[in-house]
Structures are given as structure tokens and as C-alpha cells.
Amino acid sequence: MSKPTEPAKNSRRGLVLAGLAGAVAAVAALYVIAGPNGNIASAQSCSVALEAAKAAKPHAKGEVAAFIPASQPLELKQLTFMGPDNQPVSLADFKDRTVLLNLWATWCAPCRKEMPALDELQADLGSEDFEVVAVSLDRGGPDKPKAFLEEIGVGHLGFYQDSSNALLQDLRKVARATGLPTTILVGPEGCEIGTMYGPAEWASGEAKSLIESTMVRQGT
């Protein structure tokens, strides 16, 4: 069998290097998120959230056993949705506050089931240091989700929505929010501490211990 010629070797080497470069770029793309006007915000300033994620890990059990502490936290400050006054807000507006960001919709049965627990969690832990931010993704606008929350007696949660579903699309770009409900614990600096896919009993002692463990670590 004849040996490959030098040009063939170089060509093959070039293909391998191009493949590696593509793989590195793909991995890097998972850890950035698009901001306004297409700007990219990196996760370079999330060291505090990483420490909080480590603190949360022993508490991810029982009702919140499926909580996944972040090993490479995403910076999520640029995520935008509509606030209670129907004006745009971003996670950057919650600076210095730990946020439990919950994505839900009235057509999602598990979302509907966990909403009273999220309301109770807000009643118990809500403060200047912590807020449950449940964002409705109903495409028809605010009327249906507002009516549902009123019907089940939710009275402590602020009403947040994104009928465009742009929030969901932004999170999918970084391999988050593959379905509903998705809940992300975000630190005061706007970085991901960990993520839960699927419902949880958020008013449970285990959920509160998990959240409080991260707040103590961050000094909030």
C-alpha cells in the first residue's frame, strides 16, 4: 500500500483541526446568551454562582432531587420578559436578589399543579433578597393565565409573561428549557445556580433548604 502524499496528509490534518475547532465553538456556544441587539454576554463573572451551586448540591434531594447544580453557570442577566405593569423587565433588574425563575403555561398540567407551591414559597421566603418569578408563556396574552391564577387563589406571585416565547427560545439556544415547567435558580449577580426540569414541590422544607443554602453562601 502506498504512503499518503504530503498534500494528502496536510489536507487530512486540516480537516481534523477544523473539526476540533468546530467542536470547541459548539461547546462555547452553550455558555453564552444573546443580549439586546445581538450582543453576547459571557459567563465569565459567575464564580459566586458556582460556589452557590456547590453549596446547593447536598440539598438536592427529596422533593428537589432532580435539581441540577450548575457546573458552568450561565450569565442570564439579559433574559427579558414582561413585568406586572406590562413593561419589559430583565433579570438584570433583579440585581442583588436571588430569583427562582419558573417557566409555565396554562396548557401544561404539571405547571398548573406546582403553581400553588410556588405561591406559598413566595409567601414564606419572598423579600428584598428573594423572589419567585413565574413567567407565563401562554401565547394568547395575559387574560387566560391571570384568570387561572385568580381561580386557584394565587395571591403572592407577581404576574410575569412572555407571549412571544422569546424567553423560551433564548434558553433553548443555551441548552436550557427543553420543556415546561423549567425552573432556574439565579443568583443576585444574574448567574445560574442550578436548573430543575419538570415540576417540584417548591413549598417543601427540602426546596426551602436548597434555596436558603445558596443565599447564605452568597451573603444575601
Image (cartoon, rainbow, N blue to C red):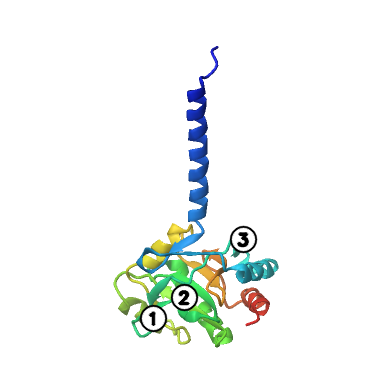
Q: Is residue 211 left or right of residue 35?
A: right
In front of the other: 113 or 56: 56
Q: Quadrant of residue 185?
A: bottom right
- Sequence-wise first label, 1 or 3: 3
- Sequence-wise first label, 1 or 2: 1
Instruction: Specify the amino acid type for callout 1.
Output: Gly
Q: Residues within 10 Å of mark 3 (few under 14, many from 20)?
A: some
Determine which residue is flagged by label 3. Answer: 71
Report, in whole angstroms, how far the alpha carbon at label 3 lies from the one at label 2.
20 Å
Instruction: Specify the amino acid type for callout 2.
Output: Leu
Q: Position of residue 4 (x, y in %)?
A: 52, 19
Determine which residue is flagged by label 2. Answer: 91
Q: How many numbered tags mark residues here?
A: 3
Is residue 116 visible in the rendered image? The answer is: no
Residue located farthest toward the left when viewing the structure as drawn: 140
Q: Is residue 85 left or right of residue 215?
A: left
Disc 2, SS: helix
What numbered label is drawn on residue 83?
Answer: 1
Report, in whole angstroms, how far the alpha carbon at label 1 lies from the one at label 2.
11 Å
Disc 3, SS: loop
Q: Residues within 10 Å of mark 2 (few under 14, many from 20)?
A: many
Q: Position of residue 199 (x, y in %)?
A: 52, 67
In front of the other: 33 or 177: 33
Q: Quadrant of residue 158?
A: bottom left
In front of the other: 156 or 69: 69
Is residue 38 visible in the rendered image? The answer is: yes
Q: Position of residue 126 (x, y in %)?
A: 55, 85
Disc 1, SS: loop
Residue at 44% of width from left, 85% of height from top? 153
Above or below, 115 relative to 13: below
